[in-house]
Image: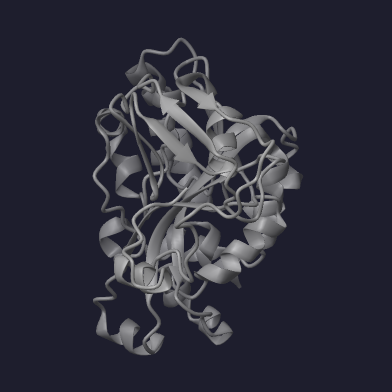
């Protein structure tokens, strides 16, 4: 039912983003300047059929090869095509023919708008639960993105596993989606509106972490999140008190990552050389790394910065020769918990630091 309803809801029921009944499939984050500039170069018909819930444009993309899972009408793909430059590429995959038609219709319009000699974007028809059917080369992508789509599929484990296989070592899955504070009753999946509005298929955050780690992404990192307001009374009544968040995660494919944030006495110093992040580099919600300062980090964060495309932008200090236990201040019962909860978990002391 999931795939058929997604095709119907996004191909037939919705004529544009104004037809959505909740704010789940809406992006409220303020884009950074380079993304704002790129958005201005996206065709208006493409933007009118955009249903994302976050910003899926991580740092340092020049020359990268990107796979967009559930690319829809193509807005994210066309934004990313500008950020990777003509030497990079973006491959979009979507299962809804109407959305693919819009995305493909404007391929040459965007190529000319970007001033490229050839298009660096392509759109493939396919089910993201069955990526093996598309004959994509394993280990060929630097970054995989997805924007409010994984919640719509039934076999989420298959998506995470396929993404891990398609990424290069040191690559990342960077995606926005909808999460719940408890498991959503399976019976809700039969409601076409709850499913189409990205609610009935939302993962309980604990199940997401289990699935991600099972696929090989051993240390999921929360980048940003916001609580959803279900302003449609009829829909809110059906949900019976379940709280939903829109959240963006980054999952690195790094073989040396550990399940916990372990302390080895390591640190980094950011050189301030990532375009658009010259003053502060944001690794995730707990790591705002100011340029020029020595920044103590856990072993996993050290690898994420040294053994990925970010390595040239950091001076890295330390080894794995001596272990000091779990990094102080890390760990919480919920990734969406506020400062008050973290303070309680730390025994009353306000917990501000994390690996």
Residue 238 x/y as whole percent: 38, 88
Counting every numbered tag in the picture gives 0
Instruction: Kindly tell me whether residue 22 is visible in this rendering.
Output: no
Residue nearest the viewer, comparing 174 with 76: 174
Instruction: Kindly tell me whether residue 131 is visible in this rendering.
Output: yes
> Viewed as shown, does residue 129 lie left or right of 83?
right
Residue nearest the viewer, comparing 305 with 343: 343
> Viewed as shown, does residue 51 lie left or right of 321?
left
| 134 vs 335: above or below | above
Residue 264 x/y as whole percent: 60, 41
Residue 332 x/y as whole percent: 47, 66
> Viewed as shown, does residue 61 lie left or right of 91?
left
Q: Residue at x 38, y 25 (%)?
A: 110
Q: Residue at x 61, y 53 (%)?
A: 325
Hey, which quadrant is residue 193 in on the image? bottom left
Q: Residue at x 43, y 76 (%)?
A: 194
| 237 vs 113: above or below | below
Residue 257 x/y as whole percent: 66, 45
Residue nearest the viewer, comparing 310 with 230: 310
> Viewed as shown, does residue 278 lie left or right of 346?
left
Q: Quadrant of the N terminus?
A: bottom right
């Amino acid at each position: 039912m999931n795939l058929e309803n997604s095709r119907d809801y996004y191909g037939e029921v919705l004529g544009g983003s104004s037809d959505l009944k909740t704010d789940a499939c809406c992006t409220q984050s303020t884009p950074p300047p380079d993304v704002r500039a790129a958005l201005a170069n996206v065709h208006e018909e493409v933007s009118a059929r955009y249903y994302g819930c976050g910003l899926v444009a991580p740092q340092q993309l020049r020359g990268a090869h990107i796979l967009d899972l559930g690319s829809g009408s193509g807005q994210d793909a066309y934004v990313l095509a500008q950020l990777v430059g003509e030497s990079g590429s973006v491959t979009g995959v979507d299962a809804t023919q109407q959305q693919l038609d819009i995305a493909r219709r404007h391929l040459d319009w965007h190529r000319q708008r970007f001033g490229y000699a050839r298009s660096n974007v392509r759109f493939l028809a396919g089910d993201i639960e069955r990526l093996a059917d598309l004959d994509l080369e394993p280990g060929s992508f630097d970054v995989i993105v997805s924007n409010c789509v994984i919640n719509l599929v039934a076999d989420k484990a298959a998506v995470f596993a396929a993404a891990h296989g398609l990424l290069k070592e040191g690559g990342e899955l960077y995606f926005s989606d909808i999460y719940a504070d408890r498991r959503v009753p399976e019976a809700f999946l039969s409601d076409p509106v709850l499913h189409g509005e990205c609610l009935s298929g939302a993962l309980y955050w604990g199940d997401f972490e289990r699935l991600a780690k099972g696929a090989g992404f051993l240390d999921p990192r929360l980048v940003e999140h916001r609580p959803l307001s279900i302003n449609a009374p009829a829909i809110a009544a059906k949900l019976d008190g379940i709280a939903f968040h829109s959240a963006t995660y980054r999952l690195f494919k790094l073989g040396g990552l550990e399940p916990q944030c372990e302390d080895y006495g390591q640190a980094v110093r950011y050189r301030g050389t990532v375009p658009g992040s010259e003053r502060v580099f944001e690794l995730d919600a707990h790591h705002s790394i100011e340029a020029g300062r020595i920044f103590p980090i856990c072993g996993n964060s050290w690898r994420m910065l040294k053994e990925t495309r970010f390595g040239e932008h950091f001076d890295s200090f330390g080894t794995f020769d001596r272990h000091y236990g779990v990094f102080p201040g890390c760990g919480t019962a919920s990734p969406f918990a506020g400062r008050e909860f973290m303070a309680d978990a730390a025994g009353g002391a306000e917990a501000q630091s994390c690996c």
